[in-house]
C-alpha cells in the first residue's frame, strides 16, 4: 500500500444526506481511494425524512418501518463501492419544505441547530482524521435544500474552528485543512454542454425540458469550475454506489440510465470549485475554469513532502480518452426523464423531492 502515490493523503467529503456522496464527487472519491489516499465520507444527517422513491421497495416492511435503519445499510454498501470510510455526523434530516425553511422545518432538525453547535462533531472528526483536503457545497447548497445550504455553513465553520488552538480543546489537537472545495459536478454548464453536444449529434436530449431551470440556477450564482478531475474509469463504481441507495433511486427510471450514459460520453470528469487555499503556491486566477486537475495539487504531506503544483494524477488513461470520444460509443442515450430522487440524475429541477 505504501507504494501507492497518494498514500499519506487524506480527503474528507462532507455531505448532507446518505446518497449525496454518490451523486457529487463520487468517482473522484473512488479514484483517490484507489491511488492510496484515505477518503472519509461524513454524512451530516441520517436521511430519515427521505421518501421511498423506488416503486420496487414501496412494499418492503423495512422501508416502511425503519427507513433510517435501511438508509444506514445502504450507506455502508455505497461507501464500500467507493473504497471510502464513512462516519455519521449525527444530525436530523430537515426534510424539504415548500417555502420558508426557517419556520417549516421541524424543530431540532439540522437546519435549525446553530452553526457553532452543529459544527462540534465535525470539528472532532477533522481533528481526528486530519484531512489535507475537504469538500462541501457552495453557499447556495448547490441544490436548494435546507440541509445542503446548512452543510456549507457548518463545514466552513468547522474547518475554521478545527484550526483554532483556542477553540474547543476538548475536541482534539488543532488541525489546519489546506484546501476546501465545493462540489460543482451538477453545474448548469455541464448539463447545458451535454445537451448541446447531444443535439449536435442528432440525439434526443433528456435534458431539453430542464434547460430553463439550469439557466435560472446558473444566473443566481456563477459557479467556478476551477478544478476538473478525469474519472470516467470510476463511473461504474459511482453508479454502483448510487444504486446502493435503493430506496432513493429507481434503477428502471429512464433518466438514470440516460443521464449517466450521456455524462460518460460527453463529460468524463467531475468538477470542484476552490473555496479555500492555504498552500503556499501561486493563487489560481479567480473565475477561470479548469485550472487544476488534482485536488491535492500543492498540498503538503505530514512528513513535509509536497505534491507538485500541477498535481500528480496519472495522465488520462486510454479508457477515459475513449469515453471522451462520442464516436466510440455506438449506443445513443435517448431515454426520456423518469422518476428518480437522487440528485445525480433527475433532481436537477427545483421541484424534485429529495431527502
Ligand atoms: Zn441531499
Image: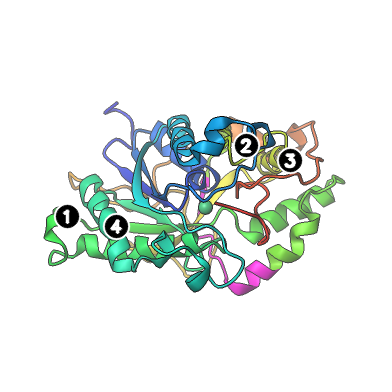
For mark 2, does the 10 Å Cα neighbourhood hold few (<14), some (14 to 19), or many (20 or more) residues? some
Asked if residue 48 lies left or right of residue 247, the reply is left
Q: Work out whether mark 1 precedes mark 3 in sequence or the reverse, and give the earlier one.
A: 1
The image's mark for residue 258 is: 3
Q: Is residue 149 magenta?
A: no
Mark 1 — residue? Answer: 171
Q: Look at the image and tell me whether residue 148 can be seen.
A: yes
Which residues, given as a range, are shown in magenta?
Answer: 216-229
The image's mark for residue 290 is: none
Q: CA distance from mark 1 to mark 3?
A: 45 Å
Q: CA distance from mark 2 to mark 4?
A: 31 Å
Q: Quadrant of the N terminus?
A: top left
Q: Position of residue 220 (x, y in %)?
A: 61, 73
* Farthest-out residue, right: 202
Q: Work out whether mark 1 precedes mark 2 in sequence or the reverse, and give the earlier one.
A: 1
Q: Look at the image and tell me whether residue 280 can be seen.
A: no
Mark 2 — residue? Answer: 321
Any atom of ligand 1 within 8 Å of the CB at mark 4? no
Element marked by disc 1:
helix
Q: Nearer the viewer, residue 109 or 316?
A: 109
Asked if residue 219 lies left or right of residue 36, the reply is right
Amino acid at each position: 500500500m505504501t507504494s501507492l502515490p497518494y498514500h499519506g493523503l487524506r480527503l474528507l467529503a462532507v455531505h448532507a444526506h446518505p446518497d449525496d456522496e454518490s451523486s457529487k464527487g463520487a468517482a473522484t472519491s473512488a479514484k483517490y481511494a484507489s491511488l492510496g489516499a484515505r477518503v472519509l465520507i461524513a454524512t451530516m444527517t441520517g436521511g430519515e425524512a427521505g421518501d421511498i422513491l423506488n416503486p420496487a421497495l414501496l412494499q418492503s416492511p423495512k422501508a416502511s418501518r425503519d427507513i433510517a435503519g435501511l438508509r444506514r445499510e445502504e450507506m455502508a454498501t455505497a461507501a464500500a463501492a467507493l473504497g471510502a470510510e464513512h462516519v455519521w455526523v449525527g444530525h436530523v434530516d430537515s426534510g424539504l419544505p415548500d417555502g420558508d425553511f426557517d419556520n417549516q422545518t421541524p424543530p431540532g432538525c439540522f437546519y435549525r441547530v446553530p452553526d457553532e453547535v452543529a459544527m462540534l462533531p465535525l470539528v472532532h472528526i477533522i481533528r481526528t482524521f486530519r484531512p489535507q483536503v475537504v469538500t462541501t457545497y457552495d453557499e447556495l447548497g448547490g441544490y436548494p435544500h435546507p440541509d445542503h445550504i446548512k452543510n456549507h455553513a457548518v463545514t466552513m465553520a468547522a474547518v475554521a474552528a478545527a484550526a483554532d488552538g483556542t477553540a474547543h480543546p476538548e475536541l482534539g489537537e488543532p488541525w489546519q485543512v489546506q484546501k476546501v472545495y465545493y462540489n460543482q459536478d451538477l453545474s448548469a454548464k455541464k448539463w447545458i454542454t451535454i445537451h448541446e453536444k447531444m443535439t449536435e449529434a442528432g440525439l434526443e436530449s433528456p435534458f431539453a425540458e430542464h434547460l430553463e431551470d439550469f439557466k435560472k440556477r446558473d444566473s443566481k450564482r456563477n459557479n467556478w469550475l476551477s478544478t476538473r478531475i478525469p474519472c470516467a474509469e470510476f463511473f461504474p463504481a459511482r453508479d454502483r454506489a448510487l444504486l446502493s441507495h435503493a430506496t432513493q433511486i429507481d434503477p428502471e427510471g429512464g433518466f438514470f440510465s440516460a443521464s449517466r450514459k450521456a455524462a460518460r460520453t460527453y463529460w468524463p470528469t467531475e468538477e470542484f470549485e476552490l473555496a479555500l487555499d492555504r498552500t503556499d503556491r501561486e493563487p489560481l486566477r479567480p473565475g477561470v475554469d479548469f485550472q487544476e486537475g488534482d485536488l491535492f495539487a500543492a498540498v503538503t504531506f505530514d512528513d513535509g513532502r509536497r505534491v507538485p503544483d500541477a498535481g500528480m494524477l496519472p495522465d488520462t488513461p486510454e479508457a477515459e480518452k475513449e469515453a471522451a470520444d462520442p464516436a466510440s460509443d455506438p449506443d445513443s442515450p435517448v431515454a426520456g426523464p423518469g422518476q428518480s430522487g437522487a440528485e445525480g440524475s433527475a433532481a436537477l429541477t427545483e421541484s424534485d423531492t429529495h431527502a
